[in-house]
């Protein structure tokens, strides 16, 4: 069995009395693209800072390539960090910026220049070598920062909200480029974001963080299709959540009492257990001819045309606190104020412990 590239083992961290990371364990595989996803304050940046050596955890250990790096300073560990503000030196040329880390390592000028050119070519900026950072666009500066980090060939590249300073269109474009560059160089990337679309677009491995803990982790397709927790179901994409109590459990089938009525579906959970049922917007059907599981009726409160579909919000007639979030076809004629039947199919309901 090959060892993981990075092994974060039972890491906890406190700033003063304030616990920020609570018993976090995580393994990172060589060549993988890992996204740390979570809301503001969930501890993503602190975990990245611990990986980069800028923060020493209060408890736990960090192994990189099998070596205990917990207290090793940033410059002495095989990681490099790309910060959101790029931190380029304004008075230096792009080439000198990219070669800076090599200069610190004592690499001679000719080798530095050659390797900086290679790294710039890798990020599609071969012609920018002699320019100054201020002559480049935000997206180009971001790529220079990436080249500067990659030129020293780290085992792990750490990226803290690397696309946070870019406008939405450029951000989506740079996502594609980041992924392509990562596959080309084969370096493991660990990238912090609070943007779930970015996570789905980039990650091989998605780590959902909440309140200093890992709530869920796995390939983004799995996290989306089968989130492990209620938080994960609402943070990685949207979900309608029905709270309920198990009233019957036999033969791997549970019956759950929910505000719209009893729902039977595959699963195991003891009678009396409080559970949550999550349903993705694309799995809810509006109208009389729908799925096999009836979810009662709902009054439409909002319809937003999104080009290829309509996003519909509707409050359950049986329990107004229950909000259905529905991805309806673009041609749907539904309007605010309409009362309409809602349904889904049993296979599309995700059973979560509440
Ligand atoms: N140097 C510090 N001193 C004290 N508290 C800190 C420090 N750095 C972070 N914190 C606190 O730790 C918690 C987690 O912060 P962290 O930056 O890791 O979260 P995050 O998930 O990266 O959030 P964001 O997306 O807003 O950057 C927050 O409550 C924050 O206020």
Image: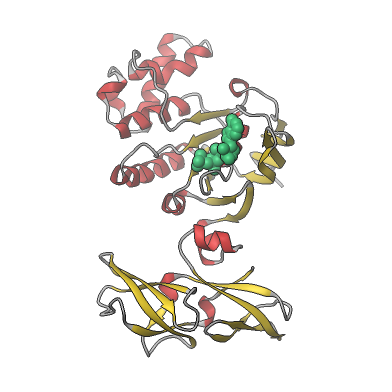
Identity of the residue drawn at 74% across and 78% down = 270
| Closer to us: 105 or 51 | 51
Is 113 on the left or on the right of 156, as rendered? left
| Closer to us: 115 or 99 | 99
The answer to whether 107 is drawn above or below residue 182 in the figure is above
Residue 247 point in image, percent of width and height: 68, 85
Residue 267 point in image, percent of width and height: 65, 78
Residue 15 at least partly seen? yes
| Closer to us: 163 or 27 | 163
Residue 6 point in image, percent of width and height: 64, 39
Identity of the residue drawn at 58% across and 50% down = 209
Say how the picture is coloured. secondary structure
Is 274 on the left or on the right of 262, as rendered? right
Q: Residue lying furthest front in this view?
A: 320
For ligand 1, give the image quadrant: top right
Is 67 on the left or on the right of 155, as rendered? right
Indicate the quadrant where residue 24 lies: top right
Marks counted in the figure total: 0
Indicate the quadrant where residue 15 lies: top right
Is 24 on the left or on the right of 208, as rendered? right
Residue 49 at least partly seen? no
Residue 28 point in image, percent of width and height: 61, 44
The answer to whether 303 is drawn above or below residue 190 in the figure is below
| Closer to us: 71 or 322 | 322
From the image, which quarter does the C terminus lie in? bottom right
Identity of the residue drawn at 61% across and 49% down = 211
The answer to whether 220 is drawn above or below residue 284 in the figure is above
């Amino acid at each position: 069995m090959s060892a993981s590239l990075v092994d974060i083992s039972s890491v906890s961290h406190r700033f003063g009395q304030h616990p920020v990371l609570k018993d976090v364990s995580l393994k990172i595989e060589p060549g993988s693209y890992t996204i740390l996803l979570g809301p503001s304050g969930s501890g993503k940046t602190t975990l990245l800072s611990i990986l980069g050596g800028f923060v020493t955890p209060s408890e736990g250990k960090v192994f990189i390539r099998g070596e205990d790096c917990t207290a090793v300073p940033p410059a002495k560990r095989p990681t490099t960090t790309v910060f959101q503000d790029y931190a380029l030196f304004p008075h230096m040329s792009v080439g000198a910026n990219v070669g800076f880390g090599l200069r610190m390592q004592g690499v001679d000028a000719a080798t530095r220049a050659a390797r900086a050119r290679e790294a710039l070519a890798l990020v599609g900026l071969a012609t920018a070598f002699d320019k100054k950072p201020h002559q480049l666009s935000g997206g180009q500066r971001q790529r220079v920062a990436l080249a500067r980090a990659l030129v020293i060939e780290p085992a792990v590249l750490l990226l803290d909200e690397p696309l946070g300073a870019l406008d939405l269109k450029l951000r989506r474009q740079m996502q594609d480029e980041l992924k392509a560059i990562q596959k080309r160089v084969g370096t493991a990337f660990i990238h912090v974001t609070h943007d779930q679309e970015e996570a789905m677009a980039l990650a091989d491995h998605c780590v959902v963080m909440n309140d200093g803990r890992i709530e869920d982790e796995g390939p983004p397709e799995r996290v989306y299709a089968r989130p492990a927790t209620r938080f994960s179901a609402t943070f990685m994409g949207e979900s309608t959540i029905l709270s309920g109590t198990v009233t019957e459990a036999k033969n791997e089938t549970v019956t759950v009492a929910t505000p719209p009525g009893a729902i039977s579906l595959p699963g195991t959970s003891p009678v009396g257990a409080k559970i949550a049922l999550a349903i993705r917007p694309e799995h809810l059907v509006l109208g009389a001819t729908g799925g096999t599981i009836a979810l009662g009726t709902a009054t439409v409160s909002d319809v937003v045309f999104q080009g290829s579909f309509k996003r519909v919000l509707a409050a359950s007639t049986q329990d107004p606190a229950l909000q259905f979030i529905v991805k309806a076809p673009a041609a749907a004629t539904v309007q605010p104020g309409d009362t309409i039947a809602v349904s889904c199919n049993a296979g599309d309901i995700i059973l979560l412990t509440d």
